[in-house]
């Protein structure tokens, strides 16, 4: 799977589940590019993650949301 295809799948899944999301890149103090991705819902839930690669940031966001939702069900 190409990285951009994986991003599209995750973004579509977030949208279908009622999440709004955003993504920005920034340069840290050591000159490295970092990716910051966030997702939020009207109910006040919000998740923000960062990673060295864009796809990794989206995967971490998706994982954080899934873990939170699973814990809520316990």
Image (cartoon, helix red, strand yellow):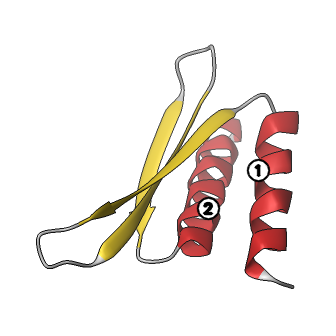
* Above or below 1: residue 68: above
Q: Mark 2 — residue?
A: 58
**Where is residue 14 drawn, in percent x and y?**
76, 43
For the residue pair 2 and 40, the one nearer the viewer reads as: 2
Instruction: Name the quadrant containing residue 60.
Output: bottom right
Q: Residue furthest bottom?
A: 1
**Where is residue 27 drawn, in percent x and y?**
26, 66
Q: Residue furthest left?
A: 29
Q: Secondary structure at mark 1?
A: helix
Label 1 crowding class (10 Å Cα cut-off): few <14, some 14-19, many 20+?
some
Label 2 crowding class (10 Å Cα cut-off): few <14, some 14-19, many 20+?
many
For the residue pair 41 and 8, the one nearer the viewer reads as: 8
* Above or below 38: residue 20: above
Q: Mark 1 — residue?
A: 11
Looking at the rendered image, the quarter that the N terminus falls into is bottom right
Q: Which residue: 76% across, 50% down?
A: 11
Q: Secondary structure at mark 2?
A: helix
From the viewer's perspective, tell me whether residue 71 is left or right of residue 19. Answer: left
Q: Are marks 1 and 2 in contact (CB under 8 Å)?
A: yes
Instruction: Name the quadrant containing residue 7.
Output: bottom right
N-term-proximal mark, 1 vs 2? 1
Instruction: Name the quadrant containing residue 10.
Output: bottom right
């Amino acid at each position: 799977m190409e990285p951009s295809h994986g991003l599209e799948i995750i973004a579509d899944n977030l949208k279908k589940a009622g999440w709004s999301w955003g993504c920005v890149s920034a340069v840290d103090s050591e000159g490295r590019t970092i990716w910051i991705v966030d997702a939020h819902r009207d109910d006040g839930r919000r998740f923000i993650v960062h990673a060295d690669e864009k796809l990794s940031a989206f995967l971490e966001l998706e994982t954080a949301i899934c873990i939170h939702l699973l814990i809520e069900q316990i």
